[in-house]
Image (cartoon, helix red, strand yellow):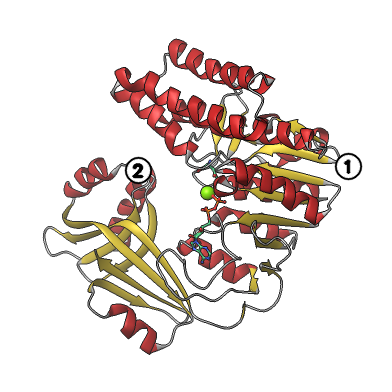
Amino acid sequence: MKIFKFGGASVKDAEGVKNVATVITKCDEKDLVIVISAMGKMTNALEKVVDSYFKSPDALELAINEVLQFHINISIDIFKNKQHLIFSDIKEILDGLRGFLKTNKSTNHAFVYDQVVGYGEMLSTLIVSTFLNEQHISNTLLDVRECIVTDDSFRDANVDWQASQIKILTAVSKTGITITQGFLGTEAKNNFTTTLGREGSDYTAAIFAYCLNADSVTIWKDVPGVLNADPRYFSTTTLLNHISYREAIELAFYGASVIHPKTLQPLQRKEIPLFVKSFYEPENAGTCVGKGTTLDPAVSCFILKRNQVLISLSSLDFSFMMEDRIGDVFKWLHFYKMKVELIQNSAISFSVVVDNKYANLEPLLSKLRSKFKVSWNENVTLYTVRHSEPKEIKQLEKNKIVLLKQESRETVQLVIKD
Ligand code: ADP
Ligand code: ASP
Ligand code: MG
């Protein structure tokens, strides 16, 4: 049994969906679980639905219609026949969304978010599964919410591994092709939909691999594999043939967004290899993440994270920033779901770079101001370079305003003002 995962970029248009069939045919695997994300930018479009629901109800219908129209248009391109049943199925699914929004009484943003954004995955898997069946790539569509059990931390749910494994082993057929949604789960108390965090479909693939003792996971991307730098920001890049689990976890954690950071731990525990391959060139080897060599070839890796926030604190009365006070800071960072990217401290000051993913900066700052003198910079870029040469760092710093720099044996981090 192998696990394949196709992300948003691989199914962003009809060509992409047809290419999924080509990839599966070329790979000639008989027993597969295929995890699929929402098409293209549909999760962002559904985030707009949530925003409209809370902030501008007049725009709600328009936002839902954008989602509807995208899936209708892509289905016209895929199926051609306008009488196809898929069209009524798509409308029916989105009527479910309308129904939820009409009857919902909860004001919990994260709860509503998770009930809404998952429609992207429900629609994409229906369309891809239907298309593949018509192409004689016979498959069963499985609702992942019957398999992945989580707690009720909406928008960032934690997996109950034991419960999920039992359900996955029952629901997934050992033979043939199963298609299911990435990103989603269900909380055990009331069976509400949860999500595993943005870009979480890679993680879904790893969950299935772990629970099914799969031979391997392949995530199909629009790049040849894991490169030593994000090609959107660096003009010359090198394909990494092999990366150890440890190095890959570090790269993903620091922001190499080609792999979701949570993906690697479950795979490492069972030594299941992860392949990152191009859906344009499925016959190429791509990258293998597994046991062994740290990095092949042994090159420096550059990771860039935009839109970070640098917060600097100092004590109001010149007293030391001791463990107890730093402990309070971490408690608040945790409470406001700020992902900490870098920390640095001195006798009376403490700096931290955070990812303000859940738009909680204001309440966090007001909490911090009650205890410290606070300054901050929004929209800074965090560069992380692994295994670098000094001259590469010099080159990177050239003509940039470096707000903070930190070096350890394997890693140099620079916080740059944009
Ligand atoms: P998916 O379609 O699965 O959501 P993503 O868009 O999340 O795929 O991931 C692929 C993208 O990751 C690439 O297009 C590339 O811009 C970006 N990326 C960031 N860092 C790297 C890296 N080190 N190597 C390859 N791609 C990277
Ligand atoms: N569709 C979700 C997102 O865009 C999950 C994923 O693509 O991995 O975040
Ligand atoms: Mg993605």
Does any portion of residue 209 appear in the rendered image? no
- Secondary structure found at label 2: loop
| Residue identifier under label 2 | 336
**255 relative to 207 in the view: left or right:** left
Residue under the point 52% across and 62% down: 252
Please say if 230 is above or below 88: below
- Quadrant location of the C terminus in the rendered image: bottom left
Does residue 184 appear anywhere in the picture? yes
Label 1 Cα neighbours within 10 Å, binned few <14 / some 14-19 / many ≥20? few
Q: Position of residue 46 (x, y in %)?
A: 45, 31
With respect to residue 30, does 171 lie above or below?
A: above
- Does residue 397 sit above or below 98 in this rendering? below
Amino acid tagged 2: Tyr
Residue 334 location (% of width, % of height): 39, 47
C-alpha span from label 1 to label 2: 44 Å
Q: Nearer the viewer, residue 95 or 206?
A: 95
Work out which residue is located at the far right of the displayed protein and give it.
175
* Secondary-structure class at tag 1: loop
Which residue is label 1 attached to?
Answer: 175
Residue count near mark 2 (Cα–Cα under 10 Å), binned few <14, some 14–19, many ≥20 = some
Which mark is drawn over residue 269? none
